[in-house]
Amino acid sequence: MTRVSRWGAALGVAGLVLAAGCAKGTTPGASGDAGGDIDQNAPVSITIGDRPTPDKPNDLKAFNQKIKDFTAKNPNITVKSTETSWQAQTFQAQVAGGTLPTVMNISFTEPANMIPNKQLPDITDELKMVDLTKDLNPNVLKIVQDANGRIYGVPIDVFSVGIAYNRKLFSEAGLDPDKPPTTWDEVRQYAKQIHDKTGKAGYSQLTTNNTGGWMLTTMTYSMGGTVESADGKKSTFNDAPTKKALQLLKDMRWTDNSMGSRFLYNQEEVRQDFAAGKIGMVLQAPDAYDMSVKQFGMKPADFGEGALPQDGGPYGTLTGGSLKMISPKATKNEIVAALKWIKFDQFDKYTTESVAVQDAKTTIADKGFVGRPGISPLSQSTYDQFNKWREPYVNVPVKQFQGYIDSTTSLKLLPEPSNKGQEVYSLLDPVVQQVLTKKDADIDKLLSDTASKIDARLAR
């Protein structure tokens, strides 16, 4: 699932640089140059989505300036923009209606359905033309590949879930702020201790706007379970791991009384209360730091990020993120132009020292953050070099993320449900909500009923 605030070894396929001019391509376009040669010098027009809204004037100014800089370097490419952005509830209607821009961000949950339905173009050869393939993380690239290894999108933002915790509340509760919980038993123990000592919610759970199902899936993974079968045709959560996850939430809520008094949270709302010191622990990716500190005023010294707690195992943690999709209606020339934009917009800062340094300086000038840990869509060698260039500008307390950093090599990265992931999350939301708001909630019945609903969706 894509984060609301906007979550390897070097790739063995060498990037192929082609001289400007014509080259053979294999991706079928909708019109114009379909079936012909790619002319990288031909006039071409593309539309890019995700334009910042007017209430974010600084972001909008930077966005428009980037377009000007890009077209100055690529005078044959005309760039238009739109505010169109990915929303789980409306995206498929936009796909069906053919109203998408040439290029835009979408969630990792989408390609598994879109690729076999031919809703994304094959961009494998065009990626080589713009010399981008070699810089991508091969493990992440699997999200946008078919069984033959052909590529249908460009991952740009990758995350894995850990546990964010308030170091100040840990200290006030008599807990070591440098030792976040690593097991779910410890989460329950720490949550009760925080509540009993400070009166704050020891632990809170996301529950609305598909995030309830998203985090229940994450807990299920950490307990050794799955949510869908490998082929995506049947639900698999009506078993011990998911039941154990829900029982844990029920026990913390009704027996321990350690979850406070608010149980309907979306991503932004839970971060706001976390930043305000009302919550001790919550499942989040490391990017929660950005919003918590910059938007909601949390002190950097109070933010901690640990590994996703495990129950036995270690089993792993959920990974997700966003990627750039290109419209299936795009011609070959439009695909190449779109990929040039993606490379300029997203990747030049990773592969050119001067751009990396300037990006760090600009980020700091905009009161942003440099060096916040996470998972990269890049090959490890590219990412390591990028971090070395930016090291003098790091302004994030990296040591406070140590538990999470360690988990990026010790925990498996488990993908989100491959079939109708957002629908699965949406149908699981009410299950989590009822467990936290109804003392007599029947976990077995809730899961059985929901499994029937989801199986019907997956069979379509």
Image (cartoon, rainbow, N blue to C red):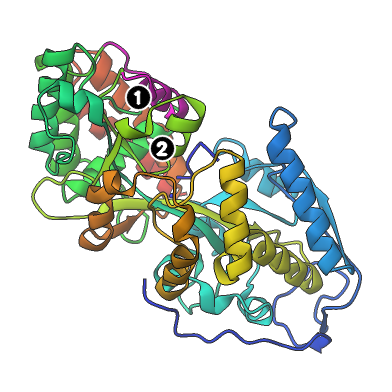
Q: 389 left or right of 289?
A: right
Q: Which quadrant is the N terminus positioned in?
A: top left
Q: How many marks?
A: 2
**Residue 207 locus on image (x, y percent):** 36, 26
Name which residue lies at 43% across and 73% down: 138
Q: Nearer the viewer, residue 140 or 208?
A: 140
Cβ atoms at labels 2 and 1 below 8 Å apart: yes
In-image side of 444 versus 98 (left or right) = left
Find residue 267 and report its image quarter. top left
Which residues are drawn in magenta?
261-277
Per the rendering, the mark at residue 274 is 1
Mark linked to residue 133: none
What amino acid type should be assigned to the residue bearing mark 1? Answer: Phe
Q: Position of residue 354 (x, y in %)?
A: 62, 67
Q: Is residue 146 above or below residue 67?
A: below
Which residue lies under the disc numbered 2? 288
Mark 1: give few (<14), some (14-19) or many (20+) Cα within 10 Å: many
For label 2, the SS is: helix
Residue 205, by quadrant, is top left
**399 above or below 410?**
above
User: Disc 2 residue type?
Assistant: Ala
Is 199 on the left or on the right of 263, as rendered? left
